[in-house]
Image (cartoon, rainbow, N blue to C red):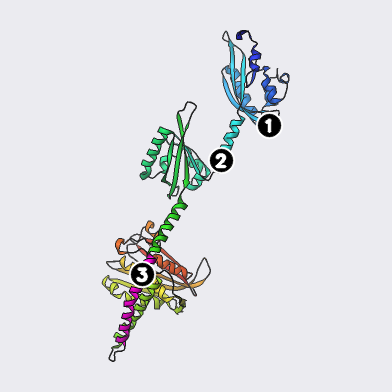
Amino acid sequence: MPIASLDPRLVLNCTPQLTCTTTPDGTINFLNTRWFDFTGRPCSDLVNNDLESFWITCVHPDDRDIVYQQWAEGVRLGKPFEGRYRILGRDGEYHWFFSNAIPMVEDDTLIGWVCTSTNIQPQISAEARFSRLIETSFVGVSISDAAGNITYMNPSLLKLLGYERNEVVGRMRWQDLTPPEFAPLDAEADRQLTATGVCQPYEKVNIARDGRRIPILVGATCIRDETGAKTENAAFLLDLSGLKRAETALIQSEKLAAVGRLAASISHEINNPLEAITNLIYIARTHENLHPEVAGHLSLAEAEVVRCSQITTQTLRFHRQSTRPTAVTASQLFDSVTTLYQGRLSNSSITIHRGYITPSPFHCFEGEIRQVLSNLVANSIDAMRTGGRIGLRAYDTTHSATGKRGVRLVLADNGHGMPPEIVQKIFHPFFTTRELAGTGLGLWISKDIIDSHGGRLTVRSRENHGTVFSLFLPLHP
């Protein structure tokens, strides 16, 4: 039998889509068997219904108004139209369908409509699962168009960068998040995307909303349309901050281990001549006609030799000797240190201004605290080569965080100060601004000593204005 002679309804019953025909005004006059298969209702129950009755019977309540408006507008204009809506199935669940309505025209006259509805619920469900996967993933995801405009960013990446979605989508480009020095890496990634559809993962830095530079590992793939043309790029980003911190800590621990091994080998060599100097000072002090002033200088020299011996053990080996804390006053600590630097202070035209309002002694490991103060005074002198002022203050206080009673020692200078990026690193091991002249260990060791006392060492500094170091020490470590 020729196909042209077949009953059109037989043909429509063979289509996989839900198919119906209507009169020009939209009254349904035929439904294929796929409607019965899906809804479980006889087609005769739905035929000859007007559109509004049909939508009330089959379409989800939330979709009825918009779909009815689309139908009414299509019927009025007599032009094809399409839409998405949910239809109630025999399983009692609503399923998403994509519908097309095509006008039937004969001799330039509209004689009716052919409407097909394709079940897209599997696609919608897959999209929802994919969306949940992306939205809840700990991996950052960003989608941008061919021009680099960001069209989507998942919560993980928004949180990492500190943005709200409405601050990024449609307002920022991928390049806005990238420091200039990493632009060549992004350009190479784009070249790989164009050539192969994917790019090899690479490390770079993204700029957060607050200006922080966040190390990331990024890979990308291109999204193509049904013709195979590239429409968007999807980037997947992993935060490397924790890994970089671990790498830095490992490198620093390896450096410290190397210093420890070096210290073990030279400590003995340092202590031997120190012991000889101590013996010679002892012999000199026993001289019969020793002038009192010379005797005082020898006593001070002997005390400093002892401190040198302690430093080789405590500082270079990074541990405290098993001694007990002793009672000492702030003035004793500060004055003993400034006496040692009197020559350098005079040569640099630096004056000392004292303000001690802590008369009572407190307990500490005196040698260690003197080492800290000595390091701070030396740094202040280095910051004021052409003259200046060092202020020394001490007063009783209570630590705001712990509630411990203690003493605060403050050393302030009006030297060249430090920029914020230097202040942030000042207590890091091996960080120095003096190149070959410094080891980068002095302030790190000083902070470690104060921490081991249960105290706190902080710094404030302004470039070209000066620096203030503040030490809190509890009354009993």
Q: Position of residue 56 (x, y in %)?
A: 69, 26
Task: State which tag comes first along the sequence, 2 or 1.
Answer: 1
Q: Is residue 430 above or below residue 194?
A: below
Q: Is residue 265 magenta?
A: yes
Separation of marks 2 and 3 at Cα, in angstroms:
57 Å
Q: Is residue 216 above or below residue 313?
A: above
Separation of marks 2 and 1 at Cα, in angstroms:
24 Å
Q: Which residues are magenta?
A: 259-285
Question: Relative to the observer, which residue lies in front, 407 or 47?
Answer: 47
**Dot 1: what SS?**
loop
Q: In the rendered image, is residue 318 in sight?
A: yes
Q: Which residue is identified by label 1?
A: 93
**Dot 3: what SS?**
helix
The structure residue drawn at horizontal position 53% and vertical position 67%, both measured from the top left corner, is 402
Q: Which residue is identified by label 2?
A: 133
The structure residue drawn at horizontal position 40% and vertical position 40%, both measured from the top left corner, is 175
Left or right of 343 in this view: 208: right
The image quarter in which residue 336 lies = bottom left
Task: State which tag comes first along the sequence, 2 or 3.
Answer: 2
What amino acid is found at the position of numbered circle 2 in the picture?
A: Leu
Q: Is mark 1 in CB contact (under 8 Å) with mark 3?
A: no
Q: Which residue is identified by label 3?
A: 265
Q: Is residue 69 above or below residue 413?
A: above
Q: Position of residue 451 (x, y in %)?
A: 46, 68
Q: Nearer the viewer, mark 1 or mark 3?
A: 3
